[in-house]
Amino acid sequence: MLNRFRIFFVPLIPALISLFLTLSLGSCARPKTTKLRVFGLPFLGNAPFFIAEEEGYFAEQNIEVELVRMDDLARAIPALIKGDLDVILGDLRVATLNAVALGGTIRIVAGISNLGSTQTGSMVLIGTSAFTETLDDPEQLRGRHIATSKMSIAEYYLEKVLSAVGLTPSDVVLRHDIPITVRHENLKKGAVDLMNS
């Protein structure tokens, strides 16, 4: 009986080793690629994301990114909640809070800014050189058209900048009707004097 077992078992050893190696190598195979649909506007604040994509860091982690173009973050938030987008690069705004209040599940997983007690926020006002080079008095901002996003962090910062020089949002013309994607074009055409970003 022992001899029969030995005759049966010995030829199985190479087969078992082969099966073990196959299973082991299979488990070491490259993990499945994760596909993400991402909304992100080409702003300087989002540069780390675009650099990571260009340098291949996502590919190294088996992440395939599809950039989805939309003209405004506020429109991207419903798409995120519905599952049409997986990730949004953007700031916290009223539309985000409204979505959460209505039962939408949103998670901030990689915040890129911190407004703690020892830090200040940042906002950039962009204007043509013809306008900004002659700007030497805050009063020159009065009545100017400024493209901004309604009820956003950027608009909040703008209000703080204006108040620091003795002005209020009612002293300027806030243009909420110009999508972020075409603000530079409107600035060049003279449709707005400044835009925030």
Image (cartoon, rainbow, N blue to C red):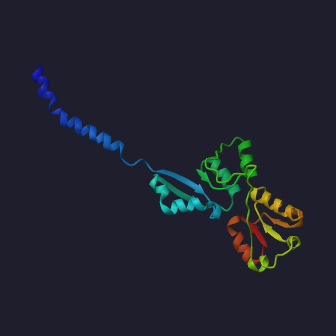
Question: Number of marks in the image?
Answer: 0
Q: Position of residue 96 (x, y in %)?
A: 71, 49
Would residue 59 be found to the left or right of residue 112 on screen?
A: left
Quarter in which the N terminus is drawn: top left
Residue sitting at the far top: 1
Q: Nearer the viewer, residue 101 or 114?
A: 114
Quarter in which the C terminus is drawn: bottom right
| Residue shown at the point (53%, 52%) measured from the top left | 36
Instruction: Work out whether 70 lies above or below 193.
Output: above
| Residue shown at the point (63%, 50%) measured from the top left | 80
Instruction: Work out whether 104 lies above or below 118.
Output: above
Q: Nearer the viewer, residue 164 or 125?
A: 164
| Residue shown at the point (20%, 36%) measured from the top left | 15
| Residue shown at the point (27%, 37%) measured from the top left | 20
Would residue 194 be found to the left or right of residue 78 on screen?
A: right
Q: Position of residue 17 (x, y in %)?
A: 23, 37
Determine if residue 43 is in view.
Answer: no
Residue 141 sits in quarter: bottom right
Instruction: Work out whether 155 lies above or below 192.
Output: above
Q: Position of residue 13 (x, y in %)?
A: 19, 33
Determine if residue 135 is in view.
Answer: yes
Residue sitting at the far front: 118
Residue 122 sits in quarter: bottom right
